[in-house]
Structures are given as C-alpha cells and as structure tokens.
Amino acid sequence: MADGMLQALDAAFGEPRLARATAARRSLWARCGCGREAPVDPRPWLAQGLGRQNVDELEDRLRCLCGARRARLEIRGLAEAPSGITGGIWIFR
Ligand SMILES: [Zn+2]
C-alpha cells in the first residue's frame, strides 16, 4: 500500500492509535522539546493492551535524557525517519 493511502486512512479514522505504528513501513518516534528524537519500540505498550490508545495519550510514559517527563509521539513512514543522531528517549512505564 502506498504511503499516501495510509495517510488517507489515518485521516479517515481520526487520531493515530498505537497499533497503527506496527503497520508495514511505519514506525513510532518520540521527539522531545530539547531536540532529541528517538525511535520507540511499541511492543511493551502493546503487551499492556494499549494498542487502541491514541499515541498522544502515551506521551507522558516517556522519559528523555534531558529530564523531560514526556515527549511528543509520532507515527512516521520509513522515508520520514530523521537522518541525524537519534536516541536518548525511552519508555518509562
Ligand atoms: Zn529532552
């Protein structure tokens, strides 16, 4: 399926849900106010049954190296992954 079609599906069904981050060619990313970006593995949350949560309801479960207690979550296509240094944000609970 083309990325454009997935975006149309996202728009049609409202807020992005966590389970959607596991779709082919999709990944979950966290971005902190300090500028850090990191890929997030959604499996621990899926194991807690959170697949139907909107990703923005999970943002306060993240911690950043800078001390921030939340980071913005986005579901991105593979082509949108940042090319710079990433890491330093992790799932806290
Ligand atoms: Zn930070």
Image (tube, grey):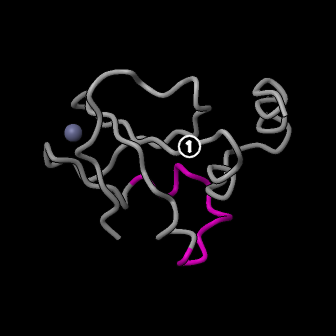
Q: Which residues are magenta?
A: 47-59
57 falls in the magenta region: yes
**Quarter of image, ligand 1:** top left
Of 14 and 66, nearer the camera is 66
The kind of secondary structure the magenta stretch mainly shows is: loop
Asked which secondary structure carries label 1, the reply is strand
Of 46 and 11, nearer the camera is 46
Residue behind mark 1: 27
65 falls in the magenta region: no
Three-letter code, disc 1: Ser
| Count of number-bearing discs | 1
Quarter residue 12 falls in: top right
Q: Position of residue 6 (x, y in %)?
A: 79, 34
The residue that appears at 35% across and 44% down in the rendered structure is: 71
Q: Position of residue 41 (x, y in %)?
A: 46, 56
Q: From what the image shows, is residue 72 above or below residue 18?
A: above
Of 18 and 13, nearer the camera is 18
Quarter residue 88 falls in: top left
Q: Quadrant of the N terminus?
A: top right
Q: Position of residue 15 (x, y in %)?
A: 69, 45
Q: From what the image shows, is residue 17 above or below residue 35?
A: below
The residue that appears at 38% across and 21% down in the rendered structure is: 83
Q: Residue furthest left?
A: 66
Quarter residue 13 falls in: top right
Q: From what the image shows, is residue 26 above or below residue 35?
A: below
Left or right side of 59 for 46: right
Q: Quadrant of the C terminus?
A: bottom left
The residue that appears at 26% across and 33% down in the rendered structure is: 36
Of 58 and 83, nearer the camera is 83
Q: Position of residue 75 (x, y in %)?
A: 58, 40
Q: From what the image shows, is residue 45 above or below residue 65?
A: below
